[in-house]
Image (cartoon, rainbow, N blue to C red):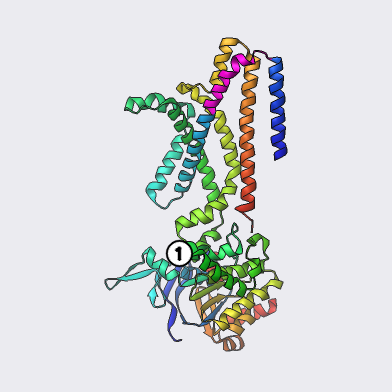
Amino acid sequence: MSDVKIRFDDVVKRYGPLVVLDHLNFQVADGEIVSIIGPSGSGKTTVLRVLMTLEEIQDGVIYVAGEPLNKMESGGRLVPASKAHVRRLRSRIGMVFQNFNLFPHMTALQNCIESPVYTNGLSKEEAIKASMELLDMVGLADKRDHYPSQLSGGQQQRVAIARTLAMRPEILLFDEPTSALDPEMVGEVLNVIRQLATAHSYTMLMVTHQMGFAREVSDRVCFFDKGKIVEQNVPAELFDRPQNERLQKFLSSVKEAH
Amino acid sequence: MTGRLAAVAALLAFLLGLSVATFSDLRVFLPAILKGAVVTVEVTFWSLILFYVSAFLSGIGRGSKNTFIRWSCVVYIEVFRGTSLLVILFWFFFVLPEFGITLSPIVAGVLGIGLNFGAYGAEIVRGAIVAVPKGQYEACTALNISPLKRMLRIVIPQAVIIMIPGFTNLTIELIKATALVSAVTLVDITYASVQQNQLHYRTLEIFSVTLLLYYCFAQIVRFGMAMLEDYSKRHLLRKA
Ligand SMILES: Nc1ncnc2c1ncn2[C@@H]1O[C@H](COP(=O)(O)OP(=O)(O)O)[C@@H](O)[C@H]1O
Ligand SMILES: [Mg+2]
């Protein structure tokens, strides 16, 4: 359990002159569930996006299961990673987006089997069997032939979670998975994530505004501000005895909003 | 949609009957015009294939990461959009032989029309591809879907529906533009009509028939594209 699954080593991410991740150092252990909280624009989404290789970093190294993601070793030196190297490491990571990003021209089941069949070369029967189990787990087996447009937001996000799991990742990234949902649908999505957190061995990294939920499922909560982790701790400590002034301010402003 | 087809068919039958009744000389010039119509259909058919293939290839290639592919597409699009179709036809038929490349009239006509319209179609393809939301690309990366499969299985199916109106217009324009192939000695429907008019001086009758035939071609295209749009709305894109 103490194996390091994700490691950010002095990672810098800039957009032009704007520094979004400022020499970030950060680790997640195998099987650990970590929530990221912080004000808007503090770089929370960016942490997930650079891990998912949706964005390049300007400096530092990201390690996934001990291997550098953006570099690879060749003759004892670190060189820029090849496409094959990136694809191999990327297959260990799955991401659930704020806006689901389901493929609108495919049914729930087709969304789930697309990559297992056409990227991983699984047979259709196998992929359908595995995906049906996942759709069943998220409570949507009866919606297998529905298109995204025929599903509610909460149902779409649950299909998106099943689609991510169908790739058999070890690491799950969630970027505010419930913030695009109507309030009455938040619960059904959180229930699925709770189930993943408690009954499975995934390593999870979750950006969330649901403080109660973060407190309930996380092993550790990190508070981000201006591209840095300002404070991190087990949830009870961080929420009940915040040390940093900006964290105290942030928590009270969140409380007011509710 | 079937209502529209029925209306066209009825109109066609009515006008045909009227023509036969009114213009008893119809059989004098009609065979020659129909022979021209066959040439028009033939040129249209092959030009359309070339038009769609080059529009898709260059429209997609225009956004390629590979500098050579991208610039080849840009040059092709610029050259064929920025010049007159008539002059392109002259080039294929009269100028290329000076470089030792001799094309038959139909090949020259099809190449000129197909490539010219392909360059316009490329912009439609490009625009539709760019209109597919960024989140779709990101989902593909997160699911490790390769760029080729992303294009073929995710992006193009969603882009096709955006392209249909533009392609309907260009297809009808293309049919009209086939009249220019008389410049490379082909006797198409328009040129056949001109010839028959010079022979028989039945201007009203001849050009009424010509007009009607072009109108029918355009209606067939509209009907086909509307069916395609219908189909893709049902099967390709369900707006999330
Ligand atoms: N593609 C981009 N180009 C320029 N700036 C960006 C881009 N994406 C994000 N940013 C900026 O980076 C900062 C951090 O963004 P983000 O990680 O999304 O914040 P958070 O998720 O914490 O709200 C913000 O100031 C945002 O405006
Ligand atoms: Mg964010």
Q: Position of residue A218 (x, y in %)?
A: 56, 83
Q: Is residue B30 part of the magenta span, yes or no?
A: yes
Q: Is A38 in front, or is B94?
A: B94
The relative height of residue A156 versus residue B47 in the rendered view (above or below) is: below
Report the predominant secondary structure element of the magenta stretch.
helix
Residue A185 found in image quarter: bottom right
Q: Is B146 in front, or is B35?
A: B35
Q: Position of residue B224 (x, y in %)?
A: 62, 39
Q: Residues within 10 Å of mark 1 (few under 14, many from 20)?
A: few
Tag 1 subunit: A
Q: Residue at x 44, y 47 (%)?
A: B61
The relative height of residue B177 versus residue A90 in the rendered view (above or below) is: above
**Numbered marks: total:** 1
Which quadrant is home to the N terminus of chain B?
Answer: top right
Residue farthest toward the left in the current orientation of the protein:
A75
Left or right of B157, for residue A2: left
Residue B225 shows in the view: yes
Tell whether circle 1 marks a residue whose Cβ is less than 8 angstroms from ligand 1.
no
Q: Position of residue A34 (x, y in %)?
A: 53, 80
The relative height of residue A56 versus residue B204 in the rendered view (above or below) is: below
Where disc 1 sits, the SS reads: loop
Q: Report the span colored magenta.
A: B23-40
Q: Mark 1 is on which residue type?
A: Gly
Q: Position of residue A153 (x, y in %)?
A: 66, 66
Residue A249 shows in the view: no
Left or right of B2, for residue A106: left
Q: Which residue is mark 1?
A: A121
Q: Residue at x 56, y 81 (%)?
A: A197
Q: Is residue B71 part of the magenta span, yes or no?
A: no
Q: Residue at x 54, y 75 (%)?
A: A225
Q: Is A105 in front, or is A257?
A: A105
Residue A149 found in image quarter: bottom right
